[in-house]
Image (cartoon, helix red, strand yellow):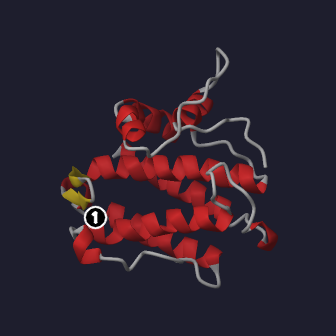
Amino acid sequence: MELLKTYRRSLAEFTDRVEQVHPGQWSAATPCPGWDVRTLVNHVVSEERWSVPLLAGRTVDQVGDRYDGDQLGADPIETAREAAAQAEVAATSPGALDRAVHLSAGLTPAEEYLHQLLAEHLVHGWDLAVAIGADPTMDVDAVAEAARWYSRHVEDYRRDGLVQSEVALPAGAGEQDRLLAAFGRDPDWAP
């Protein structure tokens, strides 16, 4: 399945960027207002940890608050690697994408949830890359898949306050910049 392959690449791309964080960069500012690098990585790691029980059929109530607070501990890079590996196993388990997932918004097809996670890895991977001075180029196929999916959900995300207003771009902007702008990111952001 192409979505699964694209998701796996986005997961690996995010993890590669986490591995590039230097010790002094965990408190660096990111494009996410009020979030430093550690907060951003903790958010994504928490999402990855949530994906394991949710893709296995558990409900939000069954998972409870176990993924609240600091998930990174003393070794954030190793923790991020472990969470990504567990999330990948959960997504690739036989039948995982054939079921519905219990999200706070209600019962959701697992493929829809995987699209949400794909976008999460891409956009926050870009946030992380520009915050630490790494190459912010995203996987082209993943960007195209996320853009197709997000075009059907952008109004929901805006209405629910999950993204900031779209950033205006010059004519001829590339697909990566258009995706970032749709998620409220300025593609020229710099620390």
Q: Camera-side residue: 36 or 180?
A: 36
Local packing at callout 1 (Cα closer than 10 Å; few below 14, some 14-19, many 20+) is many
Q: Camera-side residue: 43 or 22?
A: 43
Q: Residue at horizontal 77%, vertical 44%? A: 190
Mark 1 secondary-structure assignment: helix
Q: Residue at horizontal 68%, vertical 35%? A: 187
Regarding residue 4, the answer to whether it shows in the image is: no
> Picture coordinates of residue 35 (x, y %)?
63, 59
Q: Camera-side residue: 40 or 162?
A: 162
Q: Is residue 56 left or right of residue 148?
A: left
> Picture coordinates of residue 131 (x, y %)?
73, 54
- Can you name the residue that lies furthest to the top here? 171
- Can you name the residue that lies furthest to the bottom here? 74
Q: Which residue is mark 1?
A: 55
Inspect the image, locate mark 1, and give the three-letter code of the amino acid beneath it: Leu
Q: Is residue 160 left or right of residue 12?
A: left
Q: Residue at horizontal 54%, vertical 77%? A: 70
Q: Residue at horizontal 67%, vertical 18%? A: 170
Regarding residue 119, the answer to whether it shows in the image is: yes
